[in-house]
Image (cartoon, coloured by chain):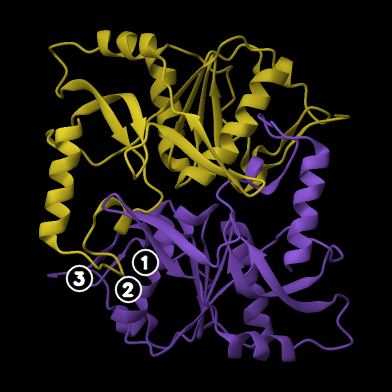
Chain colours: A yellow, B purple
Amino acid sequence: MDQDILYHLALGSGSHDLHEMFGDVKFVCMGGTPKRMETFAHFIMEEIGYKLPAGTQLQDISAFSYRYSMYKVGPVLSISHGMGVPSVGILLHELIKLMYHAKVKDPIFVRIGTCGGIGVEGGTVVITEDAYDGLLRNSYELAILGKIVHRPAILDKRLVRELKSLATHDDPYETITGKTMCTYDFYEGQGRLDGAFCEFTETDKMAYLEKLRDFG
Amino acid sequence: MDQDILYHLALGSGSHDLHEMFGDVKFVCMGGTPKRMETFAHFIMEEIGYKLPAGTQLQDISAFSYRYSMYKVGPVLSISHGMGVPSVGILLHELIKLMYHAKVKDPIFVRIGTCGGIGVEGGTVVITEDAYDGLLRNSYELAILGKIVHRPAILDKRLVRELKSLATHDDPYETITGKTMCTYDFYEGQGRLDGAFCEFTETDKMAYLEKLRDFG
């Protein structure tokens, strides 16, 4: 390509020096809302003792996309991904291309967020070992040129172990590893009874959640 | 339910008088970004000659959700839906419940946005007659409690005719009716060659687009 426009990030390989801007990135952290990821950027700044030059403040790098918010704190990017797989999907395509243009080698991508937990106490930190869709398939299904394609949903087992090793007995919460299910629908797709539509009973829901619990 | 919390709108049937706030709504207009829907609210205010009380300005009703932005101009709601079906889905569940609590009878829901066009000139306004998924099915597929369910994707034919009748020969663009395809993926799902991954050729893409053109 002549130039690569990362439209939803308000960045481009022709308009920005992406190597200069992002060449030192090691961690790409994603979460739902702009507000949460701004807070996370400040949290990380404190954690790693990163100092901004005097008279500067963090800026939303993707503000003019009106889509995602992106903050950079040294080697850490903190980016909002909106709600749902398609929104995350656009972001991942463009972030992977961004890391390519920035010549970053093997950056670590992490999604951080809230999630319903099945059979675990509220507040538990779950590090995802394996991801499943709404039909309990360990793959990402998508339609490409009218044909169904499955891509294996494989996570980095070493990263899971490393993250787990950071938990300590002093933490005011438990940290475990487990399977995570990702659905395309928040209400019916996740067995909620209080959406605008619901054609199943509380008994059906509980039977399904028990099945999920047995599945891990 | 004791009270209905419309979490992603930052509204609730217990915390807000939804009938008082939204009882006069007739049109629920949705589009992608917060910025665009704020602009649309101001555009509609001008169009219908709606006057705000002196010393007031439009306020983002859902600002504290950090998810969607909602503006109200008399009978018109203008709301951002983010990117992708799951994000729109959460919004529709909560807006349908909002209209129910507000006791609004038969509100009209419209999505307004940009879209790739196949075989039509850029800038053409297309009023969707029928919606199709990435496999050219005229239905909305979702997984509920681990089982695939299809819901017919039916649009209001009378509304299509009414909207079409508002177009005039003086418009600096053409207004037509047509089928709209909705995919779960912006890059591979819509035949783009410039995502981070692409396993098809430009020839494959063009053959697919021609198939879509023949389909209408």
Residue nearest the observer in this picture, B170 or B155: B155
Residue that label 2 marks? B97
From the viewer's side, name the closer residue of A191 and A163: A191
Task: Name the residue type under label 1.
Answer: His
Mark 3: which amino acid? Gly
Q: Which residue lies at the image location 73% right of the left edge and 21% below the top edge?
A: A18
| A80 or B143: nearer the viewer | B143
Residue B125 visible, this angle: yes
Q: On the image, which quarter does residue A197 sit in?
A: bottom left
Q: Earlier in the sequence, mark 3 or mark 1?
A: 3
- Quadrant for the N terminus of chain A in the image: top right
Q: Name the mark on residue B93.
A: 1
For disc 3, the marked residue is: B14
Q: Chain of mark 1?
A: B
Which element carries disc 1, helix, strand or loop? helix
Q: Is residue A166 above or below residue A96?
A: above
Mark 3 surroundings: few (<14), some (14-19) or many (≥20) residues within 10 A: few
